[in-house]
Image (tube, rainbow, N blue to C red):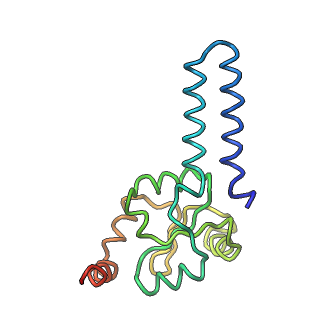
């Protein structure tokens, strides 16, 4: 758990230290701006910013059933944050797996990235794509298999 919340907590501590130093030197407005920046960045890099993660086995089972992509990510990853922000509300339609809380997920990512835990790694129909363009990921959500499943869910 420390590994997941460590980077956001460190950002908050750094923000407090920098802000306190600026406040003591008389720069109240700049101090508040720095504190706000660090708080926002800590929030965006925390697990709270991402849809609820599942483990790798559950994500694979769900992806096989509904055809949605599986995204392997980790807290603090700027590329994961970029993907999450660019997907907007559609991010909730993907299956998210935090590799820091699931050793099986970390092993799956290392297996397709030459031993590295490079994220985000998106699996579409069991085909891995490392750090894909967010527009490409949105296109995968519009695939026929996923679109048909969405229509069945929306019918009364």
In the picture as drawn, the residue positioned furthest to the left comes out as 156
**Residue 63 vertical position relative to residue 25 in the rendered view, above or below:** below
In the picture as drawn, the residue positioned furthest to the top comes out as 26
**Residue 5 vertical position relative to residue 103 in the rendered view, above or below:** above
Q: Nearer the viewer, residue 16 or 81?
A: 16
Quadrant of the snapshot with the N terminus: bottom right
Q: Could you tell whether 97 is left or right of 155 in the image?
A: right
Q: Nearer the viewer, residue 76 or 132?
A: 76
Q: Residue at x 40, y 81 (%)?
A: 67
Image quarter of residue 109: bottom right
Q: Residue at x 52, y 73 (%)?
A: 128
Image quarter of residue 30: top right
Q: Position of residue 88 (x, y in %)?
A: 39, 56
Q: Residue at x 43, y 63 (%)?
A: 91
In the picture as drawn, the residue positioned furthest to the front comes out as 156
Q: Nearer the viewer, residue 113 or 41?
A: 41
Q: Position of residue 12 (x, y in %)?
A: 67, 40
Q: Could you tell whether 90 is left or right of 110 in the image?
A: left
Q: Position of residue 143 (x, y in %)?
A: 32, 76
């Amino acid at each position: 758990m420390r590994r997941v919340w460590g980077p956001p907590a460190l950002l908050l501590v750094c923000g407090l230290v920098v802000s306190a130093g600026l406040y003591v030197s008389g720069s109240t407005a700049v101090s508040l701006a720095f504190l706000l920046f660090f708080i926002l960045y800590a929030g965006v890099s925390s697990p709270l910013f991402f849809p609820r993660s599942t483990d790798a086995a559950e994500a694979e089972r769900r992806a096989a059933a509904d055809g949605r992509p599986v995204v392997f990510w980790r807290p603090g990853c700027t590329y994961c944050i970029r993907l999450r922000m660019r997907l907007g509300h559609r991010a909730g339609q993907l299956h998210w797996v935090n590799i820091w809380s699931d050793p099986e997920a970390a092993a799956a990512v290392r297996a397709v990235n030459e031993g590295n835990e490079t994220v985000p790694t998106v699996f579409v129909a069991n085909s891995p794509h490392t750090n894909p363009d967010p527009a490409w990921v949105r296109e995968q959500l519009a695939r026929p298999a996923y679109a048909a499943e969405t229509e069945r869910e929306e019918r009364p």
